[in-house]
Image (cartoon, grey):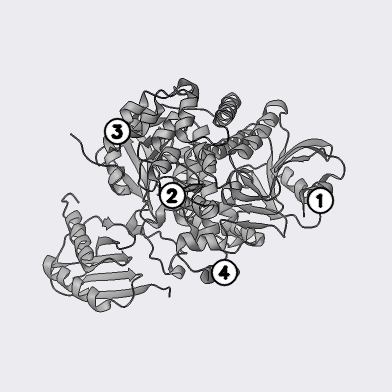
Amino acid sequence: MTGMETLHFEFDGGRVLAPFEPALVGVVASGNLEVLVESAPGAACRVDVDTSARGFGAIWEAVLRDFHARHGIAGVTVSIHDMGATPAVVSLRLDQAMSAVWGAPP
Amino acid sequence: MDWEGVASRLFGDDHDIVADGDFLGGTATFDGATIAIVGTTNHAAVGVDLALRQARAVLATTGESPGRPLLLLVDTQGQKLRRRDELLGIHRAMAHLGCCLDLARRNGHPVIGLVYDQALSGGFITSGLMADACHALPEAEIRVMRVPAMARVTKLSEELLESLSLTNPVFAPGVANYVAMGGVRSLWDGDLAAGLRAALADRDTSDRRAEEGAQRGGRRVAADVIRRVLEA
Amino acid sequence: MNSASFAEMSARQRLAAIVDDRSFHEWLPPSDRVTSPHLAQLGVPAAFDDGVAIGRATLSGRAIFVAAQEGEFMGGGVGEVHGAKLVGLLRRALRDRPDAVVLLAESGGVRLHEANAGLIAVSEVMRALLDARAAGIATVMLIGGANGCFGGMGIVARCADTVVMSDIARHAMSGPEVIESSNGAGEFDSRDRALVWRTTGGKHRWLTGDCDVLVEDDPAAFRAAAIAALDVHRPMTLAALQQESMLLQWRTAIAGEGADAIELWTLLGVADARAVPDLDAAAVRVLRPAAVAPLANGGA
């Protein structure tokens, strides 16, 4: 059955980041995902997910909540194109994306 | 329509086009001028040999007959699927043919493509699609790949691809669809000579396909993206 | 000792490694979200850059335009947006006149999920590339990805002035799986890796004259080759194409009907052809017969 699933999450709290250049990590391929992190107005951490692996909303929420807790960031939009990555790979890419934002080598 | 029928409708008896295997070649008189014909028949599978043969014919015209128009008659099932052709660089033979057509254009030869039966994939990329503009008969078929093979490669079901082929311009093989997308400039329906006459009269050899796809509504995004890159 | 593998890098990592440090300025970057309008209906996620990064950069201080295809996204297949980004880049090159357009090519050709739009797009890229080449802008293809350069992009890539391949790269038209599924494993056994690479790989293309530069699977080697290619122009004159026509005919005639690569290399004049599959790029470089590449030094 074809069809993408789109998920939205917002997390409050955290430190608003100074404006930064968008950062992209990962590739849309089977078992992988790409993550785009952008500076956003306001104090939320917003995450938008487009995924071809449907029905995993609860797991996305858990992984993303952990991510938000780990980095404590606000004033960002995280946009994800996912093709069935495992939670471990998702967490890895999210951390890599934040490293890219802060200027560390990917 | 077979190539003999096309030739007869366009030129009457005023041509010497012959088929040698899958290769078509010759000249014709049209509106008082000589034009060169290069092409394929029998739903040709284009391998190294046939690509090089067509290229030689194009080079002969470019070298010996300044300004002479070239009419490409296209009927191909696509590239030949043989190890030998890959070994011998079929991609290069096809690039060579494409470069020969491009040179002919740069040297002032009108290069006109006509899909009179089938055109698939690689066989089409270096023939009709390298013309100044490609035209087609209304009953012709243009495809990237047949559905069973496409299903194998994409892992999409044949049922899905078949249904998309009926409803979705991106998948539908009808030439009217290709006209809407800008891939084909016009259909020659009935009065083929009028189609050729109009094609010969159009001396703008720039690649207008993205713009025409946008104007006609079948392919809206490409022209806009090209423009955005130019303006970025 | 540099142990980085070009093949294992992502398109963006390769691009960054090729151009001068931090000189890349991207056009239509991911944050612009110029994505495919055709993939959602097939349940396939889009990519923010539709699988190709384009922009301007410098290479050894010289202005270039550059594009890198991501082979892991849709096999590097060219769809409507991806193709239009390449066309825009090449048309802009006609206007802005960089020294070269460098394309890091890794593609299966037309993106089948976009069928007709992809087919037309590939053709538009081909026309635009030949326009840039004819205008005297050096066109350079760097082929070193694990997925190779196939299909319509295989044709397009060979329309460039210079094709650089690593010894592990492949450049061809149809992949071995497609040939096997059409005509059987007897025709082409896609699981025979040695056969696949000696039929379509960098060493074979080098020895037979179908690629212009052979390098190791190393970003530094690709960068050096790209720099050297900035000044290589092979104008497509009538004489050059007539010469190529004769060369390709001669090569085809020599091969006969059943030649395997090793036999063909021997017939073309390669010494000790049997040893080639085990040699590294440097050792293979010196084996190329002069006859297969009469224009090797480029034209004026």
Point out the image quarter for the N terminus of chain C. top left
Which chain letter goes with mark 1?
B
The quadrant in which residue B69 appears is top right
Give the alpha-carbon distance from disc 2 to disc 1, as whole Å: 42 Å
Disc ID at residue C221: 3
Residue at the spot 42% in from the left edge and 49% down from the top edge: C107
The answer to whether the residue labelled 3 contacts the one labelled 2, judged by CB atoms less than 8 Å apart, is no
In this view, the residue in front, C102 or B19, is B19
- Say which of marks 2 and 1 sits in front: 2
- To which chain does the residue with label 3 belong? C
* Left or right for C250, reference C214: right
Residue that numbered label 1 is attached to: B5
Q: Nearer the viewer, mark 3 or mark 4?
A: 4
Q: Amino acid at mark 1?
A: Gly
Q: In the image, what residue type sits under mark 4?
A: Glu
Pick whichever of labels 3 and 2 is earlier in the sequence. Answer: 2
Please tell me the numbered disc located at residue B112: none
Between circles 2 and 4, the one closer to the viewer is 2
Image height of C43 relative to C235, above or below: below
Indicate the secondary structure of the residue bearing disc 3. Answer: helix
Q: How many marks?
A: 4
Left or right placement of residue B105 versus residue B9 in this view: left
Q: Is residue B119 above or below residue B173?
A: above
What secondary structure is marked by label 2? loop
Q: Chain of mark 4?
A: B
Residue C35, x across and y down, in percent: 41, 60
Q: Residues within 10 Å of mark 1 (few under 14, many from 20)?
A: few
Q: Do residues under tags 3 and 1 come within 8 Å of each other at their CB atoms? A: no
Which three-letter amino acid code belongs to the residue tagged 3? Ala
Q: Identify the residue under disc 4.
A: B162
Decide: few, some or many residues near mark 2? Use Cα within 10 Å; few <14, some 14-19, many ≥20.
Answer: some
